[in-house]
Image: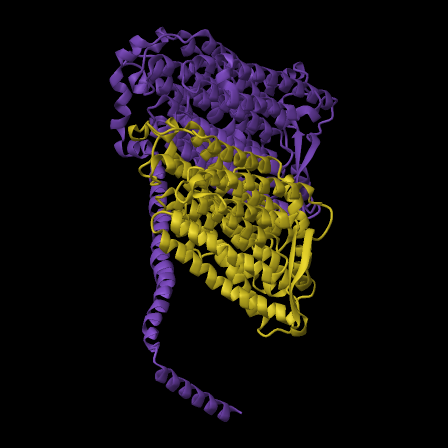
């Protein structure tokens, strides 16, 4: 099932490849069809996931590189647990939404949609791989479509931004690869499950160094201050759909990597690093939020708010208790939904007004009451209003992290005041105020695909906010073994 | 109606909100009748809860604990170590709140049918009002702090939406934002307080936390900190010093909204919260003293600002802040009876005053009291109901405010500084109330255009005025045992709401005479000062210009906060932005890239493409490595 999920977008790429140039505009329909199927499949995986059984489910495996005489082998293994199943669903949903909001792309449409689908496969591979080498390959595969999508279909300083994104990630992943090789060669396997069960001890490099090598790549991806400056640039210059994918799922690769690899394989080293991680988290939350207040461009505003919000993920990670870890896992999903939605809304505004400068926009509620209402709801979710998705994750992180890091947590809680500040400030400037003649011709939602993408995301934000157990019960299954493992070194 | 079904109370307006938000344009009259009828049903149900409560309560057993009905598990992580149940809880405090909220909400909705007629977004208005009522009813029936927080934020959202109802107007949009962010500072404190209590008590259930605290489960200093954080939430929501700045601006919302949300119900949520948690405050008296003095400062300060405000709604807003201060003083003195009693009476007369001011604004399109005057000839019903409300606020016997203010003074009897401050504030209250009434309704009209335009409001607006005037006149009598028993309860409000022992009401003649003298004295001063012609209205300004400027500028708190935001928060933002751009990005990131690039540029000249050069380098390398190997082995 997971292998099908991985291959499905590639099948779409193949179909698009055989599409004659004269029928280029049909690429979007192929992409829609394929991503809708993938979304349905991801939903099926999520629903059929057994919340009471322990361990990985839907596992497929075969041996890929056998080098037994050299003391290792590389396998193809995919599987999901409570940590990855929600992310797989998130990926399915956001990929579909990304295809939908790209329906007005006409420039080199075949390649555009093909790369979008490759991106889906790559991220799916990251979220499902249970072998370090395989994980690494998918991690690197994601760079190619991202680089091209930003540098070809982007705007502004798109080549600078794309290159910056590439160099940042590659620097991180070089360290990660060293760490993986050290771990795998010492243990004689790259199988994450086996590595987790028996963490290697006799390694080439000190384990503390290995831990920082591995987590560096994830911290770049998350991103954590001061490794964040690629994010606003990449977001600002990327096309809407790519921003949605970037904020919605690509950042989650960082958090997921920490929960899947850095913590379980090196629990003692993680435990030693927890104070430093908490400090980095609190700094990110505050630094990001204060910077967000200064942004004048809607997309940069949301990009910086992501830096702040992903700090909550790291705070949950740094606390290392089961509640806090659940909060971190929940925050990844809810932030993906909310920020994905916000980027869609900004994209819709930009498509109409051709500007994202907050100072130039005003009174848009007159012309676009529905877009305005949806943006307000998304904004309220981002500032952590109860009843919407963001609150569930944030409160769980706060409750879980207080015991371990009281100062960092209380600081982080005050971050939500700043969140209220920048969200409401932007909403007020852009949507409220007197009718502005300059914008009088702008339409509200005018295409079915815009409505479909926004409505679907809104429903999810509401469902998770009102009844979080649809999500939290799955997450709890994935967090339980991790928390038990981390409680070990603490005791 | 059993206590288990109490969850229906918020559910009904919540359902109406959903219907109105989605389908209001399709409904006849945009669905206003749905909201009104739904609210009427809620009033009936609230009365049913009160009577059921009295059945279970009235057998001579004065058990202040209510009924706890468990609903369902909302979140469960870590196998029950961390779980949030949605549960409801009903006791005497809840019953009082249910009655206040539902009755005032019904009156306001009926009134709004007339007041908001012809407005754009008429249906949305009723939807938002229903959403507010649902959230408020959930807040007062919450059995656990997480649900309470949930509802707490929801009423904040409703307030934001309704203050910003006229979002085309920049001032309204600013006021909505200001209200939300200011109260959010308090909300964060509340959240931290809740988390701190949960961490030690291991539960969000209010009654279990109280038991845990009374059993000495908390460390004293820890609990003090937790309760002070919790109190921050009350300070924000109830617009107490120093977070009081949002409430006067909140008057940008439609006037019926001010009556319901920013006078009678939402702003008393803070009082409700402290009353609900008072047994815990009793464990840490330092925290209770903070409540007392916060209330005292606020009561006095707001009353002085009310003296000089010139907008009819702002005068009432300052008055609300001041009266909320009175309630906190009562709580700080350990008397939930007095606080909840004043909350009860205040809700009726203050809602009446706001709706009355709405009637004036509706008729004249004017809210500056210096532009009004003489309206009693044009609006007799509005005038006389407003006078009743004002006398109740000033504390004239036998109107409702007299009894409840008397209870608070009684509670302060043994604390001279507090008592004196309260008495002075009560005098100020009488003065500004008299000023408001005289300038608005009596004397000669100062703006003839507005005066000619004026007319009495339609019956759908005056009916709620009459009902509320009647309640403002008689609501105080529930203090008497006989009245309580006649209604079917075990006794007066003192038998219903208490912390440790039922409070028995004694009519203290000396105290009552003193309080009445203060009120009448204040009214007398007001009459002497403002009775008569137009030019008197502005005389206060000449009397003490510096003091007047201080009060008109609200003690410069708004300016102080604005500069804090401008210079500290945004200033920090600028500094960090520059740091981020210059140091982190350009030096660290681009600089790193450029360094690599520079080396690349230099080193490329080594690639000459000539075999001899490479051979030489190779030979050099081999020699060097050999030497290294030779000497280290």
Give the image location of residue B270, x and y in percent. 53, 33
Give the image location of residue B395, x and y in percent. 47, 21
Q: Residue at x 56, y 31 (%)?
A: B272
Q: Colour of chain A?
A: yellow
| In this view, A205 is above or below B163 | below
A478 vs B151, nearest the viewer: A478
Quadrant of the image containing the C terminus of chain A: bottom right
Give the image location of residue B21, x and y in percent. 51, 23
Tell me where residue A35 sits by quadrant. top right
| In this view, B13 is above or below A347 | above
> Which of the colour schemes (rainbow, by chain, secondary structure, one colour) is used?
by chain
Q: Colour of chain B?
A: purple
A433 vs A164, nearest the viewer: A164
Q: Residue at x 47, y 22 (%)?
A: B124
Task: Specify whether B370 is left or right of A469.
Answer: left
Tell me where residue B558 sits by quadrant. top left
B275 vs A431, nearest the viewer: A431
Give the image location of residue B127, x and y in percent. 51, 22
**How many numbered discs, if any?**
0
A341 vs B626, nearest the viewer: B626
Q: Is residue B221 visible?
A: no
Q: Residue at x 50, y 45 (%)?
A: A16
Q: Is residue B48 visible?
A: yes
| In this view, A245 is above or below B318 | below
């Amino acid at each position: 099932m997971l292998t099908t999920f991985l291959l499905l977008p590639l099948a779409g790429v193949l179909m698009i490849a055989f599409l004659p140039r004269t029928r280029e505009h049909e690429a979007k329909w192929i992409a829609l069809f394929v991503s809708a199927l993938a979304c349905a499949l991801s939903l099926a995986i999520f629903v059929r996931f057994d919340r009471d059984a322990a361990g990985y489910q839907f596992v497929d495996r075969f041996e890929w590189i056998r080098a037994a005489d050299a003391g290792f082998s590389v396998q193809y293994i995919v599987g999901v647990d409570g940590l990855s199943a929600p992310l797989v669903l998130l990926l399915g949903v956001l990929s579909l939404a990304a295809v939908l909001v790209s329906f007005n792309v006409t420039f080199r449409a075949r390649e555009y949609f093909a790369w979008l689908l490759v991106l889906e496969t790559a991220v799916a591979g990251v979220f499902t791989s249970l072998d370090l080498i395989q994980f690494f390959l998918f991690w690197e595969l994601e760079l190619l479509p991202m680089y091209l999508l930003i540098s070809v279909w982007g705007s502004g300083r798109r080549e600078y931004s794309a290159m910056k994104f590439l160099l940042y990630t590659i620097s991180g992943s070089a360290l990660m690869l060293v760490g993986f090789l050290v771990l795998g060669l010492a243990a004689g396997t790259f199988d994450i499950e086996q590595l987790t069960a028996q963490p290697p001890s006799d390694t080439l490099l000190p384990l503390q160094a290995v831990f920082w090598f591995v987590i560096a790549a994830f911290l770049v991806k998350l991103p954590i201050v001061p490794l964040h400056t690629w994010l606003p640039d990449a977001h600002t210059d990327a096309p809407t759909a790519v921003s949605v994918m970037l904020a919605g799922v690509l950042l989650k690769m960082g958090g997921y990597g920490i929960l899947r690899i850095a913590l379980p394989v090196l629990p003692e080293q993680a435990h030693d690093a927890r104070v430093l991680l908490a400090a980095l988290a609190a700094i990110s939350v505050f630094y990001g939020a204060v910077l967000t207040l200064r942004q004048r461009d809607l997309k940069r505003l949301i990009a910086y708010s992501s830096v702040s919000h992903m700090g909550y993920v790291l705070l949950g990670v740094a606390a290392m208790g089961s509640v806090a870890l659940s909060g971190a896992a929940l925050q990844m999903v809810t932030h993906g939904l909310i920020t994905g939605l916000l980027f869609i809304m900004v994209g819709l505004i930009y498509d109409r007004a051709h500007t994202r400068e907050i100072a130039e926009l005003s009174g848009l509620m007159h012309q676009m009451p529905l877009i305005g209402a949806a943006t307000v709801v998304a904004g309220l979710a981002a500032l952590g209003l109860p009843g919407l998705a963001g609150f569930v994750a944030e409160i769980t992180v706060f409750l879980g992290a207080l015991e371990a890091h009281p100062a960092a947590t209380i600081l982080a809680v005050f971050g939500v005041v700043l969140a209220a500040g920048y969200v409401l400030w932007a909403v007020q400037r852009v949507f409220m105020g007197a009718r502005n003649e300059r914008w009088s011709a702008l339409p509200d939602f005018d295409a079915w695909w815009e409505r479909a993408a926004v409505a679907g995301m809104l429903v999810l934000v509401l469902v998770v906010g009102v009844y979080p157990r649809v999500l939290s019960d799955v997450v709890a299954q994935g967090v339980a073994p991790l928390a038990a493992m981390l409680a070990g070194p603490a005791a | 109606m059993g206590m288990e079904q109490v969850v229906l109370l918020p559910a009904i307006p919540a359902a109406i909100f959903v219907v109105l938000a989605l389908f209001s344009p399709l409904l006849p009259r945009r669905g206003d009748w749905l909201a009104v009828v739904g609210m009427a049903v809620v009033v009936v149900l609230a009365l049913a809860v009160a009577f059921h409560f009295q059945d279970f309560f009235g057998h001579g057993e004065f058990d202040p604990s209510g009924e706890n009905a468990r609903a369902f598990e909302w979140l469960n992580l870590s196998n029950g170590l961390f779980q949030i149940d949605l549960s409801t809880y009903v006791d005497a405090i809840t019953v009082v709140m249910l009655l206040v909220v539902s009755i005032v909400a019904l009156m306001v909705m009926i009134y709004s049918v007339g007041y908001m007629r012809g407005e754009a977004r008429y249906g949305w208005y009723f939807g938002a009002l229903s959403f507010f009522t649902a959230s408020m009813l959930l807040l007062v029936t919450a059995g656990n702090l997480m649900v309470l927080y949930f509802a707490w934020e929801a009423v904040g959202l409703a307030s934001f939406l309704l203050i910003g109802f006229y979002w085309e107007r920049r001032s309204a949009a600013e006021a909505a934002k200001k209200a939300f962010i200011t109260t959010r500072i308090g909300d964060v404190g509340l959240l931290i307080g809740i988390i701190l209590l949960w961490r030690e008590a291991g539960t969000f259930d209010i009654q279990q936390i109280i038991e845990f605290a009374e059993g000495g489960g908390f460390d004293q200093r820890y609990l003090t900190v937790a309760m002070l954080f919790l109190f921050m939430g009350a300070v924000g929501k109830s617009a107490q010093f120093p977070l009081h700045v949002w409430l006067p601006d909140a008057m940008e919302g439609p006037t019926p909204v001010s009556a319901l949300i920013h006078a009678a119900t939402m702003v008393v949520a803070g009082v409700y919260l402290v009353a609900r948690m008072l047994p815990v405050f009793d464990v840490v008296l330092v925290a209770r003293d903070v409540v007392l003095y916060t209330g005292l400062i606020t009561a006095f300060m707001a009353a002085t600002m009310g003296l000089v405000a010139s907008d009819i709604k702002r005068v009432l807003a300052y008055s609300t802040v001041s009266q909320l201060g009175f309630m906190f003083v009562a709580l700080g003195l350990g008397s939930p009876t007095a606080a909840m009693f004043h909350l009860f009476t205040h809700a009726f007369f203050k809602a009446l005053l706001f709706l009355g001011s709405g009637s004036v604004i509706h008729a004249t399109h004017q809210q500056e009291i210096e532009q009004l005057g003489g309206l009693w000839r044009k609006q007799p019903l509005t005038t006389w109901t407003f006078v009743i409300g004002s006398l109740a606020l000033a504390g004239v016997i036998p109107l409702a405010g007299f009894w409840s203010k008397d209870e608070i003074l009684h509670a302060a009897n043994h604390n001279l500084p507090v008592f004196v401050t309260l008495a002075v504030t009560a005098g100020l209250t009488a003065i500004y109330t008299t000023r408001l009434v005289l300038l608005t309704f009596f004397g000669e009209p100062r703006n003839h255009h507005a005066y000619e335009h004026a007319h009495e409001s339609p019956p759908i607006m005056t009916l709620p005025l009459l009902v509320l005037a009647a309640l403002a006149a008689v609501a105080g009598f529930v203090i008497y045992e006989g009245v309580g028993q006649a209604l079917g309860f075990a006794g007066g409000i003192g038998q219903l709401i208490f912390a440790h022992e039922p409070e028995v009401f004694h009519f203290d003649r000396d105290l009552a005479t003193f309080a009445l003298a203060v009120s009448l004295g204040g009214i007398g001063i007001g009459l002497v000062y403002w009775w008569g012609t137009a030019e008197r209205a502005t005389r206060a300004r000449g009397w003490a210009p510096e003091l007047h400027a201080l009060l008109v500028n609200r003690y410069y708190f708004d300016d102080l906060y604005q500069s804090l935001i401008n210079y500290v928060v945004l200033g920090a933002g600028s500094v960090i932005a520059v740091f981020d751009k210059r140091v982190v990005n350009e030096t660290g990131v681009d600089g790193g890239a450029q360094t690599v690039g520079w080396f690349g540029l230099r080193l490329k000249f080594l690639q000459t493409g000539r075999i001899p050069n490479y051979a030489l380098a190779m030979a050099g390398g081999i020699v060097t490595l050999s030497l290294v190997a030779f000497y280290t082995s």
